Image (spheres, grey):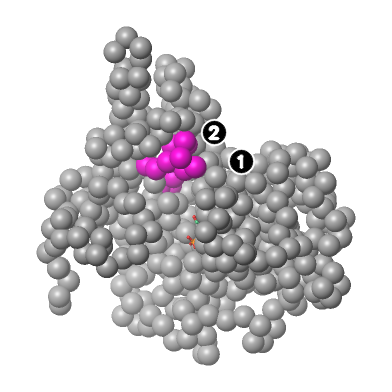
Amino acid sequence: MHDDFNLTPEEIRALEETWLFPTYKRSNLYCAQGDGAYVRDLAGRRYLDFLGGISVNSLGSGHPRIVAALSRQGERLIHCSNLFYHPYQGLLAKRLAQLAGMDRVFFTNSGTEAMEAALKIARAYGNARARGGKTRILSLRNSFHGRTLGALSITTQEKYQAPFRPLIPEVGVVEAFTPQALADAFSDRVCALVLEPVQGEGGVFPLPADFMQAARELCDRHDALLVADEIQCGLGRTGKLFGFEHYGIRPDVITLAKSLAAGYPLGAVLGNARVSGTLGPGDHGTTFGGGPLACRLALEVLAVIEEEGLVAKVKETGDYLLEGLRSLARRHPSIGEVRGLGLMIGVELGDAAKETVKRLLEKGVIANAAHETVLRLLPPFTITRKECDLFLETLDGVLGGIEAEQSPAS
Ligand SMILES: Cc1ncc(COP(=O)(O)O)c(C=O)c1O
């Protein structure tokens, strides 16, 4: 088997610079292997991973049950198309629907595609109620839902949208996270309100509780769907299985992806009884979505989360990490707010965020900067207190160095 191309970092970089659209400014890490909460580069150097492939590697790398399911199902059947049955799609749909209190599921290959399906459900719902008169979709300031034209249209950040206008029509933006701002944006023409219970790319902002209550009430009052984008914050990340559970409300539509199949691409849109009639035969489809390997892996992910008690562990470790960060904040003037739920944490660092990420990487720790100014932490659920201590110690040193350089005396 030709499984090792033996490329040097310079060769890898040169190939990409020549042949790829330059959409990514990659950091100087050449990933070769993963092991639990660690990644090794091509030279064999180990990095502590506090980003988890952006909320994907929730079970870390190389979890034995995932590896076993991958190889067993890989040998049996990887793909068969959606023209035929296989054992796992229905099983997974049932499991997810029961966990989320939903009725129907459609599987996709990515989060963005799950959002596209949610948008189609929203429009179909509105059109079935008032043809042409109920097509408005509300999304929140600072949101991120993906990069295809539909998902981009509700990703209300200028830097993502500007080059690609015109976007889809009939999108309204809720400019503040207050019940009043939400009420002002609503009307009977709204077919859906889309939100992330914890905004991720926007800088890790858990939405206020009164805002979420108002979201549910206003959607009910105006016969609109509440769509929760749980792509980043769902499946245990916040210390509850779903982000919306923190607020005591239930949405009508839920989107999932990221960690769902442990790194193999899989997304899902889940809907309750209100929307179960919105997509009929031929209304939507996908070649890859919900294939046997992806679904088999997701069933294993859900079983591991349950059997290893990982949601409770996320809460416990997340509280420990938050406390450690808050204690660092008392000593480091560069740290502003520390916020988050479970193991989805943001640390406001202002201008120092990008430099911090760079220096952490130099010291063998992976994290990233969301919204330019926020150090975002999304470590695997299996991260230990000892690994949190190592992270905190490294961050302490990095911030100390940056602050010393910035202080007037230096
Ligand atoms: C909240 C949220 N929605 C949607 C997406 C898009 O998902 P994907 O990159 O899998 O298409 C992301 C990705 O970061 C996300 O964080």
Q: Classify mark 1: helix, strand or loop.
A: strand
Left or right: 343, with 97 as reference point: left
Q: Residue at x 70, y 83 (%)?
A: 280
Q: CA distance from mark 2 to mark 1?
A: 8 Å
Q: Mark 2–mark 1 contact, CB under 8 Å?
A: yes
Between 105 and 386, the residue placed more toward the observer is 105
The N terminus lies in quadrant: bottom left
The residue located at (73%, 55%) in the rendering is 172
Q: Is residue 230 left or right of residue 292?
A: right
* Residue occupying the point 62% across, 61% down: 153
Which labelled disc corresponds to residue 14? none
- Depth order, front residue of 200/75: 200
SS class, disc 2: strand
Q: Is residue 271 above or below residue 31?
A: below
Q: Residue 140: x and y, percent?
A: 67, 49
Q: Is residue 73 visible?
A: yes
Write down the residue under mark 2. Answer: 339
Q: Is residue 379 magenta?
A: yes
Residue 91 visible here: no
* Three-letter code, disc 1: Pro
Q: Which quadrant of the rendered structure holds the C terminus? A: top left
Please state the extent of the stretch shown in magenta in the rendering. 367-383
Label 2 neighbour load within 10 Å: few <14, some 14-19, many 20+: some
On the image, numbered disc 1 is attached to which residue?
Answer: 206
